[in-house]
Amino acid sequence: QIYGKTCSIPTSKTSSQSSISNLLAARGLLVPELTQILPMPRDMLYLCQHASIFMHQLERTHTLTIVASRLREVQHNTGRSLHCKTIPADNILPFIDKATSICNNTNTEDPALREHERLETLGDSILLFFIVLNLFAKKPSSDVSYVLDMFERVICLQGKNEVLFKAAMQVGLQRLVHVGNVSSTKSWRSIYKTTPKGPTASFTQTMELSRKQMSNIVESVLGATILIDPTGCMTVGFLNEIGSCLPNIEEDTFDLTSWFAGKGTCLTEGYPMNGRSEWAVELAKIKGILQHEHHIISTLQRKAASFCQLLTKQRNSQDQIEMLQLDPTASLLLHCALFDDSLDDQEYNPGTIGLGSFSSLRDKIFHVGNAALQLSIVSEIYHLYPTCTSGDMHLMKVVLMSHDSLAYIFVKSRFHECLFDTYADATIIMQDYMKESDLLGSKEWAKHDGWKISGGLGEFRRRIEQYYGDDGCSEMARPQYMGLAAGRLWGHTNKLPDAASDDLQFSMKCVVGALVLAFGVNDAWDILRPFFLELMLLSPEELRTSYMGVSDLVSCYKKGKK
């Protein structure tokens, strides 16, 4: 009996079915599909008759609730291990639902049905950043010639689709994936695997997910976790869950209980460089060597002061700029970023271990800067253009992060004057290209009253005001990058020679990396955003319309997924 009501298990005409029913009854098991409860309450009868309308959504919500509970748990555990203050995660379900809902109509224009692709693009940047930060934390000292190659190999290895597919299967993400909208047109099946009855019984939608699709789901979930928890604790916790699937190219030299070896997420605050004794020793060694290189350290101090003065001209925090000069670790990171000498000059004794370590640290900072800049730009675009597709996001990312764009911005902002080697060949070559391109670009801008699109300078200032709010900052604002044309320079449809842009874009990313390690991704981006904002004010469609035939990038990245 259940709640005083009599329960009966109907017998079947076939002996096999009857024996099963009798066996279940003998053991006292009440299977819903084989049990009749009489009399049944009218409301319950009504719900059962209309179960197909809501059960699919109810079951999915139940599944997502279980996932949300697990994500909160890993967020809490990670925050405790990293001594990081976590934030309440009350919006998990809608983000995870979007991340694991695949659109089966590739031509749909509904942005809500393509949100998982946008999250995938964001998650790809998140994955890159934490792979790099994890490797940075593990490798305080490395052979100088080995650093760049090691980072590139690990990034390539751990970001492979095959690796992410195995990770997805390990944590059971395949059970979360939903194709299309959750609606009453979908059939549902109970946990007992019975055959559904009624008008939807014949409708069963199945879709074989490819390994690429499953790896994309991993990145979508990563994108969702960073939106749920901007501190990165939930993201790191999820990465630790799949960490056993992320291979290394060599054995770790120390014991790890989790995949992530970092002492902080480096998102909301700077990285604790002294959190591991190995890093503290490495930094102390570099500082000791530099104390004996009086010419180098005095030059770098002067150059760092000039760099800070350039930053004060933008909308930045004075406290952070002062920290770059006063905090020993932040100052060392900035000096390292500005030290662009190749150590080929025998005057500085290239065999010196200290300067070799200094150069090695710069290479690591470069990778941190490259990953952090990509994450910052993609995240900014994700929020700035909520209806843009993943293809739009990729277009804007490559436009802002192309070697030509970064080198142009670096020189235009006069950052090149703050490098140790002020008169490097790359700077001279790039300046020659820029003079020609600025002249061509100024002629194009003159056709539209001071900017590339209709409305000219007035439209530019209106968008600046809309971005920052009405605080008077737009009155004197003028666009500066007239020589740039969607990731290329005017007059050059394709990429400039490496001799012009390669070293300068490398230095730009080193500067970004130093700021990120000193302040965290968010504060570093607040400092650097003004130097990139002008390029983000043009929407993806405006880039395609304005620069088709002028830049090869706009034809490479269409409106679709990639």
Image (spheres, rainbow, N blue to C red):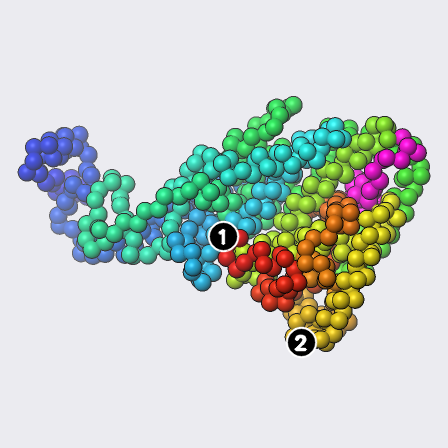
The quadrant where residue 420 appears: top right
Residue indicated by mark 1: 117
Kindly state the secondary structure of the residue where label 2 is placed: loop
Amino acid bearing label 1: Glu
Please give the count of numbered marks on the rendered protein. Answer: 2
Q: Label 2 vs label 1: CA separation? A: 33 Å
Q: Nearer the viewer, residue 437 or 155?
A: 437
What residue did someone put label 2 on?
455
Q: Amino acid at mark 2?
A: Gly
Assign the magenta stretch its main secondary structure: helix
Which range of residues does the magenta coloring cover? 322-349
Q: Position of residue 7 (x, y in %)?
A: 13, 41
- Which mark is drawn over residue 414? none
Is any part of residue 166 visible from this angle?
A: yes
- Residue 55: x and y in percent read 29, 51
Residue at the spot 19% in from the left edge and 34% down from the top edge: 29
Image coordinates for residue 148, horizontal then vertical, percent: 70, 35
Please give the name of the residue rendered at 90% of the width and 39% of the height, measured from the top-left corner.
Answer: 296
Q: Residues within 10 Å of mark 1 (few under 14, many from 20)?
A: many
Provide residue 142's location: percent of width, then percent of height. 73, 29
